[in-house]
Amino acid sequence: YYEPVQADWKPEYASLLIGVQASLWTEFCNKPEDVDYLLFPRLAALAEVAWTKKERKDWTSFLKGLDVYNEHLTAKGIVYARSMYNIQHTVTPNDGMLEVKLECIRPDMEIHYTTDGSEPTATSPLYEKIVPVKEPLTLKSATFAQGRQMGKTLILPVRCNLATAKPVSGDSPSVKLLTNGIRGSLKYSDSEWCTWNDNDSVSFTIDLLKPETLNTLTLGCITNNGMAIHKPSSVKVEVSDDNSSFCEAAMRSFTPEEIFREGNFIENLPLKLRGTQARYVRVTAKGPGVCPASHVRPGQVSRILFDEMILE
């Protein structure tokens, strides 16, 4: 039932009539517990948005109330998301090393970590500032409260090659992900995949800081058929000693059958450089174009995502 709009109607009245809404899509929910996991404790945040006046909203106070709310959920046997306790990472190349930044959305959590591959505990080193990494290692970290682990253990295998932590330039704001030593996951939005706005042709150049002997260049590439993410139609590698005059060192092309495959998987795309000597390496990848008529997204322009450039 809707009242007729009055002559003195004002836009700010809309929230009084409509309220707030949060949508849940259940195409990936196979059982009631899956729905519970996605709903809780997010419903508490929705209620906070709807019922708490702006001037009374306080993040610290909300977290305290949320902990009590979660105890009620646990007592009722409701499986709820604990992602609020998980750690978000950022690994950035800087001056020949990698800087690992760890964060949790909850400021009341302690983060403890290890670099020897062992499981973190409440007595492991406390994360207080950016961790510098100069060599391959596996960093593990987790959040703790009163000595109890609260979130999942974050496992970061840092792998190094000739390109790791080297300066890289290109036409994407996320181009540094190509040399940060961290591989992406099957989740294309996991913040480790380098993306481009224009996928017709993408390019990036790495400065190795000194001439190196190069045998293989490998690009980490993801396919997510449902999101129209596919490998490029071609990849060209050029090398230079002065970052001005480049010559082609390797080229590889892919057929539509190879490109537009179904599924969600990660591939390594190797290109042989056969002992080429160079300081600068430029990669140019051509986009695969529009998805064919048989695709789940026919006619849509597909995208390229790379996670790492591996030079050996």
Image (tube, grey):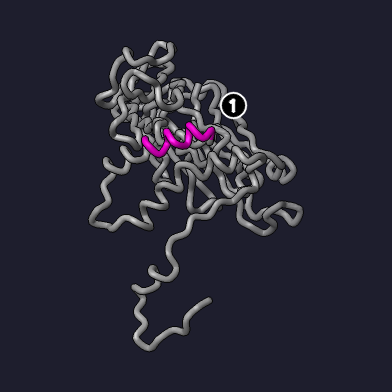
Residue at (44%, 23%) from the top-left corner?
Answer: 153
Would you say 74 lies left or right of 233 here?
Answer: left
- Closer-to-camera residue (223/95): 223
Q: Nearer the viewer, residue 189 or 271?
A: 189
- Residue at 30% over, 15% down: 125
The answer to whether residue 76 is magenta is: yes
Identify the residue at horizontal 53%, vertical 49% (top origin).
201
Would you say residue 161 is visible in this rendering?
no
In magenta, the rendered stretch is: 67-77
Q: Residue at x 72, y 54 (%)?
A: 292
In the picture as drawn, the residue positioned furthest to the left comes out as 55
| Between 108 and 251, the one nearer to me in the picture | 108
Whether residue 199 is situated above or below residue 248 in the rendered picture: below
Q: Position of residue 220 (x, y in %)?
A: 55, 32
Q: Which of the 4 image quarters holds residue 244?
A: top left
Q: Which residue is mark 1?
A: 272
In the current view of this chain or complex, which residue is farthest to the bottom? Answer: 7
Indicate the amino acid at tag 1: Lys
The foreground one among 244 and 140 is 140
Image x and y of residue 72, in percent:
44, 36
Residue 172 visible from this viewpoint: yes
